[in-house]
Image (cartoon, rainbow, N blue to C red):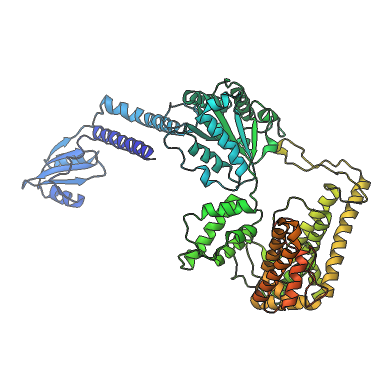
Amino acid sequence: MKKISKNVGMYLVLIVLVVSLVNIFLNPDGSKKSQGRETLSYSGFLKELDAGGVSKVTIDHDELTGVLKNGKEFVTYILDSATLPSVVAEKGVEVEIVPPPKNSWIAALLTSLLPTLLLIGVWIYFIYNMQGGGGKVMGFAKSKAKLFLDNRPKVTFNDVAGCDEAKEELVEVVQFLKDPAKFARVGARIPRGVLLLGAPGTGKTLISRAVAGEADVPFFSISGSDFVEMFVGVGAARVRDLFEQARKYQPCIIFIDEIDAVGRHRGAGLGGGHDEREQTLNQLLVEMDGFDAGSGIILIAATNRPDILDPALLRPGRFDRQVVVDRPDVNGRRDILKVHLREKKVEDDVDLDVLARRTPGFVGADLANLVNEAALLAARRDKTKLGMPEFEEAIDRVIAGPERKSRIISKKEREIIAYHEAGHALVASKIKGADPVHKISIIPRGHMALGYTLQLPEEDRFLISRQELSDQITVLLGGRVAEMICFGDVTTGASNDLERATQIARQMVTQYGMSDKLGLVTLGRKQHEVFLGHDIVDDRNYSEDVAHTIDLEIRAIVDAAMNKAKEILTENRDRLEQITKLLLEKEILEGDELDELLGYPKKEIVRKAASAKEKAEVEDNSESDGEEREEAGAAAETASQESPSMPDEEAESAAETILSGEKAEKPSDPDAEVPESGAPGDSQESEDAAN
C-alpha cells in the first residue's frame, strides 16, 4: 500500500512540473506585467487624453500601458484596439503597438504531445498495478499465490479442535515433509494431493494454516478464483507459473482454497461449459500428473461442494486422500469453546459441557461467533468477565437473531403468539422421545420470527426413525392446532411450520421408503441447479398415478400428526392455559420452568440419574444391583434437595424408573410423560412468521 501511494505521489509531482514548464513557455513575461504601475479606469484615461496629460501609450492586445506627463506609469484595459491608436495619435501622443508573440517550437511540441503522453502514462500505470504491481507490465500469466517462508502463519494444531481425525491425516503430511526417509524405509508414498471436504465454517482453511505453521517448509496459498480471468489461457498460464515456482522451493505445500471455483465438472451448464475455466482445470490436471516420483510438492485443497468437482480431479494419483472435516460432536464443540476462551476472562459458573450440549449443529465459525457475541454483551453490560447469562443470550442471538423489543404487537396478536408457542411446547413435552424443550419466547427476534420454541437434543444422533419423524411433524403442527382449539380460527403465523412439516412428510414418502403403500422405493431425482451441470428441472421417474398416491400419503401423514396434536392439547387444555398465562407474564420460559409447571423432574436430575445408571453398568455384574439402588437413593436425595416441591418418595421413584430404562410418569398428572433424555435430531426451532 505504501509503495502504491509513493508511486501515485511521484506521478502527480511530475504532472505538476510539466504543466508549470508549459505555462512558462507559453507566457514567458506574464509574471512581469502590471508590476509597479497604477491601474487607471478607461474613463479616467480618456479624460487625461483630452486634457493632454498623456505623453506615451503602448497597446498590447486589450491591455494599454502608458506614461503621463507628470511621469507616472499607468495601465488600463480597452475593448476596441483597432480605432483607438489613430485617435490617440491625433492628440499628439506617441503610440507603440506590441506585435503578437511567437511561440517557440518547443512550446508547440509540448502543447500537442503532452495530452497524448499523459494518457499513455496513466494507462501504463494502471495496467502495471492491476497485473501484480511488482512484475512486468503485461504480467497476466504471473501466479497470484502468496509465498510464506519465515512469515508463515503462527497457527498450530493446538489451535485446531473438534476434528481430530482430520488433524491426524495432516500430521502425517507434515511428518513426511520433515522426515521423508522415515516413509521411504517402508516403501510408503505420501499422497500427492489432499482434498479437505466439509460444510462451511468447519475449519478447513484453519487446518491448512495450522499445516503451514507446523511444517518448516515454504507454503503457497491461493484461492481458486485467482486463476480465472476474462482472457482465455491466462488461468492455465498462472497454473504453470505456480508449479514452476513450487519446484524451485520444494519440498513445499500448495494450498488452493475454494477449488470448486476452478475444478467444476467440465461441460457443465447450458452453453457447454466455460472455456477459460476448463483450460485452467486441464492445466491443473496435467501439472498434478506431472509430479516426479520423488517430488516434495504436496497440494492441499479445500471445498464445501465435492459433488460438483470434475471426476478426473478426484481420481487416485491426483487427490489420493480426501479428508472430511465434519461438524463437531458435543466433545468437539467443548474443545472448540476452550480454544476460543483461552484469552478471555469467564465467570466460575460457566460450564462448557452445558454450552456444548446446547449448541447442536454448530460448527467452529458458529462457536467463534457465539463467544464473540457473549463478549460483546458483557462489554455492553459493563462486565469484566463473561458469564452464563451472556452465553445463553448469545446462543439465542446466533440461532434466532437479536431481540426486537421495539416492535409493537397488539394485545390480541400477543395472545395468539403465546397460545401458538405454548401449543408447540406442550405437545413436545407430552410426546415420548421428542427433543426436550429448552426455551419458549414470545419476544420477536430476527427478521420475521414473532416467537419461537427451541428444542435441543441432549446427545448427537445420526439416525432417526419413522416414529421420530412423525413426532417432529406433530410438534410442528402443535401451534396451529392450539390456535384452532382456543380461537376457532387460524392465522398466517404457522406458515413456516406447515412448510417444514410438509417437507419432512415428502421426504418420508419419496426418499426414505417409509410409505406402506409405495414400498421401499426412492421416487424422483433431487433437483439441482443448472450451472452445476445437472438437470434444469426435477426428473419425475414415476407415473401420474404414483404422483397422486404420493400426495395422498403426504396428506395422510400430516393429518395423522394433526389429529395426535389435537388429542394431546384437548386432553391437557388446562395445562395449555397455564403455560400461556405464565408466558404472557414472563415472555420467556426456560425448559426447567416448563418442567416444574408440568410436574416433571428437572433435566439435571434426570441426567444425573442416567449417568449413575451408566456408571453402575460398568461395575461388576455381581454387585450391580446393590450399587444401582445406592445410586438411585443418591439421585432421589438430590431430587429432594433441588426440587423441594417434589416429595422424596416421588423423586426416588423417578430416579429408579430412569435407571430401569422406563418412562417416568409425572407425579401430579398420571397421564403426562417425562420427555426422554438424548432425543434424536438436530436443534428444532418453531418460528412464527408474519405476513
Reply above or below: 307 against 105: below
Residue 107 lies left or right of residue 625; in this view the side is: left
Q: Quadrant of the N terminus?
A: top left
Q: Is residue 489 visible?
A: no
Q: Provide residue 531's location: percent of width, then percent of height.
A: 70, 38
Instruction: Give the quarter of the image for residue 623.
Output: bottom right
Q: Provide residue 604's location: percent of width, then percent of height.
A: 66, 67
Q: Provide residue 86's location: percent of width, then percent of height.
A: 19, 38
Instruction: Give the quarter of the image for residue 489.
Output: bottom right
Reply above or below: 647 against 13: below
**Which residue: 70% across, 37% down?**
307
Q: Nearer the viewer, residue 74 or 90?
A: 74
Reply above or below: 284 against 323: above
Q: Provide residue 381's location: percent of width, then percent of height.
A: 49, 68
Instruction: Give the quarter of the image for residue 680.
Output: bottom right
Residue 454 lies left or right of residue 22; in this view the side is: right
